[in-house]
Image (spheres, helix red, strand yellow):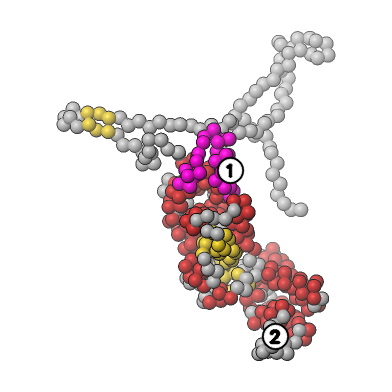
């Protein structure tokens, strides 16, 4: 309900019109060839023309100067550097299929051959990615700078197989930008090398992975993670306080959403006070259910319930950041959606055999994901970068 639908509609300016004449009356067999047309019924078919490759030959004239007798040759365009080469449009299609739709080398080569009757080798596909990787260095640096300058950014990480070992994919993103890196480490070393969090001064949305707290930005915790843990405690361990906390978090979320709908940019002080009071009561109830009889951890570890309760107690401001500041989301789903696409890549194409291939994919995917978020045409965006044009300059100027 409420989802916008898309229906194929007739256009006022068709590319081609085919008229189907009626020659005789099917009832009495009378000829209608000279009868005036009374009206026409229209039906339109939307299709694509047959795909074919177009080969353009560039010729440079060579002339002999009548004055000095020197042979003078015209210059080829800067992007025509080889006796035979692929153009930017077919390169853009290859890059689109491999990096936006996550297809492996072999399937991409098959699709190009089936669509355009062009046999293209895996080595050529690799070289196309390699050239584009170099071409988008500046645009992706722009993406990184925009995330560092943003007020709210999302961070996440996930394991990914590279060179027969588990490495870590790190993502930083906003509603308009996505930046990916792959690193052998998961924690602070990887985050330092990515060089976003050390410079970031806004509000970082993430799960409760401790290395994030090494950085001096403001921290906001993902409540989708909390809901999953609370649901487990309620359903599996029958802890009633967990259900109360679920209800409270969802009530605050719905209240914030309602305020946004009616144009308010903050909750009333009275509402915040009531929510905080209820929050603290639920945490106290949780500790009564799960008393900490060994605070120095001499004999046993904390239970799952105790760990979660201490998080609710010690990180109340970070958990309820979405209540205080409406620009902060309730969860970290944006980063998880960005991560999910790389996991889909791994499911479709398998692991990365070489580190350089993984790095190339991360930079290219950063570019296409950011273009997609800003509703640019992906193929046109790829062609722009191949032509040495940074499509994000306008965004950077703003």
**Mark number displayed over residue 277:** none
Classify residue 112 by image quadrant.
Answer: top right
Q: What secondary structure is marked by label 2?
A: loop
Mark 2 or 1 closer to N-term?
A: 1
Bounds of the magenta segment: 101-127
Q: Name the residue under label 1.
A: 107
Magenta stretch holds residue 308: no
* Left or right: 346 in relation to 392: right
Q: Which residue is drawn at 72% across and 51% down?
A: 3
Provide residue 126's location: percent of width, then percent of height: 48, 47
Relative depth, front residue between 29 and 267 = 29
Q: Is residue 255 something that shows in the picture?
A: no
Main SS, magenta residues = helix
* Left or right: 229 in relation to 204: right
Q: How crowded is mark 2: few (under 14 residues within 10 Å), some or many (20 or more)?
A: few
Give the alpha-carbon distance from disc 2 to disc 1, as whole Å.
Answer: 53 Å
Q: Is residue 89 above or below residue 192?
A: above
Q: In this view, does 224 lie above or below 344?
A: below
Q: Which residue is drawn at 52% across and 43% down?
A: 94
**Mark number displayed over residue 300:** 2
Magenta stretch holds residue 119: yes
* Left or right: 27 in relation to 300: right
Provide residue 239's location: percent of width, then percent of height: 80, 77
Relative depth, front residue between 346 and 75 = 346
């Amino acid at each position: 309900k409420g989802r916008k639908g898309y229906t194929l509609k007739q256009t006022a300016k068709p590319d081609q019109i085919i008229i189907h004449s009626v020659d005789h009356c099917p009832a009495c067999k009378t000829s209608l060839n000279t009868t005036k047309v009374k009206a026409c019924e229209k039906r339109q078919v939307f299709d694509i023309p047959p795909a074919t490759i177009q080969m353009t030959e560039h010729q440079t004239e060579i002339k002999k100067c009548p004055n000095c007798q020197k042979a003078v040759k015209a210059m080829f365009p800067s992007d025509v550097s080889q006796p035979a080469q692929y153009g930017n449009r077919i390169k853009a299609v290859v890059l689109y299929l491999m990096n936006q739709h996550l297809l492996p080398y072999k399937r991409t080569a098959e699709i190009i051959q089936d669509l355009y009757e062009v046999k293209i080798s895996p080595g050529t596909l690799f070289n196309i990615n390699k050239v584009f990787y170099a071409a988008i260095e500046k645009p992706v640096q722009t993406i990184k700078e925009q995330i560092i300058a943003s007020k709210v950014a999302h961070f996440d990480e996930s394991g990914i197989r590279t060179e027969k070992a588990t490495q870590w994919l790190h993502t930083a993103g906003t509603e308009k930008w996505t930046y990916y890196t792959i690193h052998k480490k998961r924690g602070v070393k990887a985050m330092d090398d990515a060089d976003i969090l050390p410079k970031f001064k806004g509000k970082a949305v993430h799960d409760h992975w401790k290395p994030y707290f090494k950085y001096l930005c403001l921290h906001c915790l993902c409540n989708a993670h909390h809901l999953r843990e609370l649901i487990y405690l309620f359903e599996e361990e029958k802890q009633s306080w967990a259900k109360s906390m679920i209800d409270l978090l969802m009530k605050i979320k719905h209240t914030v959403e309602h305020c946004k709908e009616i144009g308010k940019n903050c909750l009333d002080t009275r509402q915040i006070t009531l929510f905080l009071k209820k929050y603290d009561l639920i945490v106290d109830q949780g500790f009564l259910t799960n008393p900490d009889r060994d605070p120095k951890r001499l004999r046993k570890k904390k239970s799952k319930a105790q760990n979660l309760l201490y998080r609710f107690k010690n990180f109340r401001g970070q958990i309820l950041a979405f209540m205080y500041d409406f620009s902060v989301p309730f969860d970290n789903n944006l980063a998880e959606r960005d991560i999910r696409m790389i996991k889909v890549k791994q499911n479709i194409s398998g692991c990365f055999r070489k580190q350089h291939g993984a790095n190339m994919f991360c930079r290219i995917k950063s570019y296409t994901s950011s273009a997609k978020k800003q509703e640019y045409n992906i193929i046109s965006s790829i062609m722009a970068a191949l032509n040495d044009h940074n499509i994000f300059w306008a965004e950077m100027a703003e």
